[in-house]
């Protein structure tokens, strides 16, 4: 039986304690009041989302993926960031190859931090936070060149006017900020640092961590970015205009700064022990922001919850289980850290379900999978 591993824990400190000029534009900011649902409650996706494709990834010794960190799709090709490798499949799930050049040679990365594809050019960019450089490969994983950004980043996304990155808790240009913009048009001519947004207090770097595998989420007219320390979802336009779009209000069930800073915790374990015993919620994680709905997850007492916000009715549904329809059958699975989701653009998203019986239960037969198989990728769109 293949052992399921949880996705990596990144330190991600992005509390907007200083407001930038872009943050002051709050006329379109939507507040979502988030209560803690019961552990038996479920989010019914049936009336909102349609599963358009189910990709059952072929399982071989070379293609085994313990956890899917990020999914990128170009027509019939599926690229997956998993661990230290980039996997390539087609939409039928056939394994087509793997990029795993971890070694530090001239054409090798040492740490696969983030992944970008350029469909028009059929190129892949691998960002290596250790070497602070982006490596360009063809879709056939042939190395072409690399470019040193010279900045330590945990996530990177391509905009029309340049690159946007997040350094997480790291200090970039002697300034702790959530977002950094690099102006330029392509990797061969390079990108130059331009400006930063969303300053934060570095003291908090000692206290809060966040589970996330995809820092930027494609949405209509730009990308979204979650500032987990003020529970705000920002929209970044193609010219790097940053504006708050949603505020997730946990009310008196939010972990506050005063509960964390200056308490002389000896380790992050002590911090989590406190948080998990406090019945308070924290860390808005990955999101999918579609035209009609917003999906996001958050954590409470070590458990992961999913929320669906209906923009038309302002109704919120949250739970630790998800319900959806596939082949005229209702599927109910537990939502946990083992289930990941994200955006693929064009008002579509994906959800990754481990094939294990501990997650799918009796639904293994519906998808025709068994323990030890690679995860299943569900592609969905709005109804």
Image (tube, grey):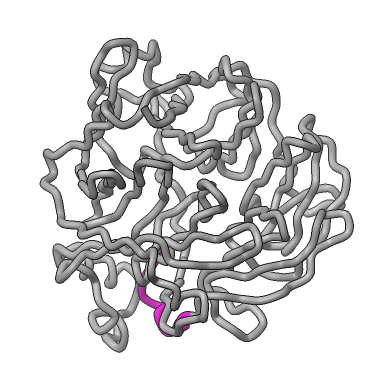
Foreground pick, 162 / 72 = 162
Residue 205 showing in the rendered view: no
Locate residue 116, reporting x and y percent.
67, 46
Q: How many marks?
A: 0
- The N terminus: image quadrant: top left
Residue 127 showing in the rendered view: yes
Query: In terms of image quadrants, where is residue 70?
Result: top right
Q: Is residue 138 left or right of residue 286?
A: right
Foreground pick, 207 / 118 = 118
Q: Quick check: is 204 in the magenta stretch?
A: yes
Please tell me whether residue 158 is drawn above or below residue 74 in the rendered image. below
Foreground pick, 236 / 333 = 236
Please tell me whether residue 226 is drawn above or below residue 346 in the rendered image. below
Query: At 31% from the left edge and 31% from the top edge, which residue is drawn?
Result: 48
Q: Is residue 50 left or right of residue 214?
A: left
Locate residue 132, reporting x and y percent.
72, 64
> Residue furthest toward the bottom?
262
Foreground pick, 212 / 191 = 191
Magenta segment: 200-209
Q: Quick check: is 375 in the magenta stretch?
A: no
Please tell me whether residue 335 is drawn above or below residue 358 in the rendered image. below
Query: At 87% from the left edge and 50% from the top edge, which residue is drawn?
Result: 145
Locate residue 117, reporting x and y percent.
69, 41
Please tell me whether residue 158 is drawn above or below residue 200 in the rendered image. above
Locate residue 76, reporting x and y percent.
64, 21
Query: At 44% from the left edge and 25% from the top edge, which residue is drawn?
Result: 376
- The C terminus: image quadrant: top left
């Amino acid at each position: 039986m293949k052992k399921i591993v949880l996705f990596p824990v990144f330190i991600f400190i992005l509390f907007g304690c200083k407001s930038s000029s872009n943050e002051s534009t709050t006329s379109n900011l939507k507040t979502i009041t988030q209560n803690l649902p019961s552990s038996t409650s479920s989010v019914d996706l049936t009336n909102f989302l349609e599963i358009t494709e189910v990709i059952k990834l072929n399982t071989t010794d070379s293609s085994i993926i313990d956890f899917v960190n990020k999914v990128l799709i170009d027509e019939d090709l599926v690229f997956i960031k998993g661990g230290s490798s980039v996997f390539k499949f087609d939409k039928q799930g056939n394994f087509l190859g793997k990029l795993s050049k971890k070694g530090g040679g001239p054409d090798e990365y040492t740490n696969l931090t983030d992944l970008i594809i350029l469909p028009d050019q059929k190129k892949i960019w691998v960002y290596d936070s250790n070497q602070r450089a982006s490596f360009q490969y063809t879709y056939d994983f042939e190395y072409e060149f690399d470019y040193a950004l010279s900045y330590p980043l945990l996530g990177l996304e391509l905009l029309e006017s340049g690159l946007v990155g997040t350094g997480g808790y790291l200090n970039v240009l002697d300034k702790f900020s959530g977002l950094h913009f690099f102006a330029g048009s392509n990797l061969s001519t390079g990108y130059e640092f331009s400006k930063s947004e969303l300053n934060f207090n570095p003291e908090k770097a000692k206290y809060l961590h966040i589970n996330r595998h995809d820092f930027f989420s494609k949405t209509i007219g730009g990308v979204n970015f979650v500032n987990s320390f003020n529970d705000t979802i920002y929209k970044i336009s193609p010219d790097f205009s940053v504006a708050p779009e949603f505020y997730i209000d946990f009310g008196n069930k939010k972990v506050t700064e005063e509960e964390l800073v200056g308490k002389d915790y000896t380790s992050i374990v002590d911090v989590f022990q406190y948080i998990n015993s406090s019945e308070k919620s924290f860390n808005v994680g990955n999101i999918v922001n579609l035209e009609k709905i917003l999906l996001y997850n958050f954590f409470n007492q070590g458990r992961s919850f999913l929320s669906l916000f209906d923009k038309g009715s302002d109704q919120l549904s949250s739970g630790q289980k998800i319900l959806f329809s596939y082949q005229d059958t209702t599927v109910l699975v537990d939502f946990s850290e083992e289930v990941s989701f994200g955006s693929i653009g064009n008002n579509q998203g994906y959800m990754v379900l481990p094939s294990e019986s501990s997650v799918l239960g009796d639904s293994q037969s519906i998808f025709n999978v068994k323990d030890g198989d690679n995860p299943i990728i569900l592609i969905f769109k709005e109804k």
